[in-house]
Image (tube, rainbow, N blue to C red):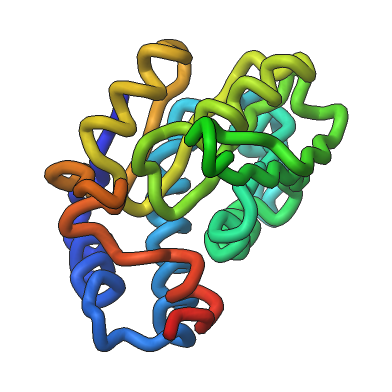
Amino acid sequence: MAESIEHPCVQHKLAIIRDVDTGHKRFRELSTEITKFICYEALKNIKTKEVTVETPVASATCRKIDTDIVVIPVLRAGVGMLEGILELVPTARVGFVGVYRDEKTKLPVSYYERFPPQIKGGTCIVIDPMLATGGSTVCAIDLLKEHGADNIIVICIVTCPEGIEFVEEAHPDVRIYAAAIDDELNEKKYIVPGLGDAGDRLFGTSH
């Protein structure tokens, strides 16, 4: 199931990050800001526990997060979203998945994976700015489940119906959160209207 975050602050920042004239410095800043908003919504139902704390006046019954949170950027563009989540949840652990597309088979191939043990029993957040075909996302989720993860959510900035459908068919238990669900993929498998190549725009490697 996919949810688009329609908060005006998210949509305002999305309008700026989409703009072709937005440079890589501002693109990185906006990626962090948008990710923080999306993560705020995505984590609203995570497990908490009741605790008692002493204020300067009296005892107070409060709630604290009661699950390990592990963030998994899909390399390389996912790294551009990492800071936004760590600002919101500084105690989160971080794993990594590197995926490339085989030019002959057109299938995603994992070339790097590194997960903390807390993915078992914890809340895993897969991050990638663009969920386009869904291949890299499904590959990352497959790897996480192979290593024992059973509570996974996906956070992206922009996605499309084709990518959502692909992920949902493979992993119907995984919820997707995005700032926008765009129209479609074009013949080059870019999201339309999308953001362009998020990795190039994040790191200033576009020509």
> Residue at image x 45%, y 84%?
24
* Residue 180 vs residue 50, the one in the foreground: 180
Horizontal side of residue 164 vs 122, given as left or right:
left
* Residue 189 vs residue 193, the one in the foreground: 189
Please state the horizontal and vertical placement of residue 89, each as a whole percent of the image: 64, 51
Horizontal side of residue 191 vs 147, given as left or right:
left
Residue extending furthest toward the left? 183
Please state the horizontal and vertical placement of residue 55, each as a whole percent of the image: 68, 50
Inspect this view and state whether residue 61 appears.
Answer: no
> Residue at image x 17%, y 58%?
193
Q: Is residue 192 above or below residue 152?
A: below
* Residue 189 vs residue 60, the one in the foreground: 189
Inspect this view and state whether residue 9 appears.
Answer: yes
Look at the image and tell me in which quarter the C terminus lies: bottom left
Horizontal side of residue 128 vs 100, given as left or right:
left
Please state the horizontal and vertical placement of residue 186, each as a whole percent of the image: 20, 48
Q: Is residue 26 above or below residue 109?
A: below
Quadrant position of residue 70: top right
Residue extending furthest toward the right? 117
> Residue at image x 30%, y 47%?
189
* Residue 84 vs residue 51, the one in the foreground: 84
Q: Is residue 118 above or below residue 205?
A: above
Quadrant position of residue 110: top right
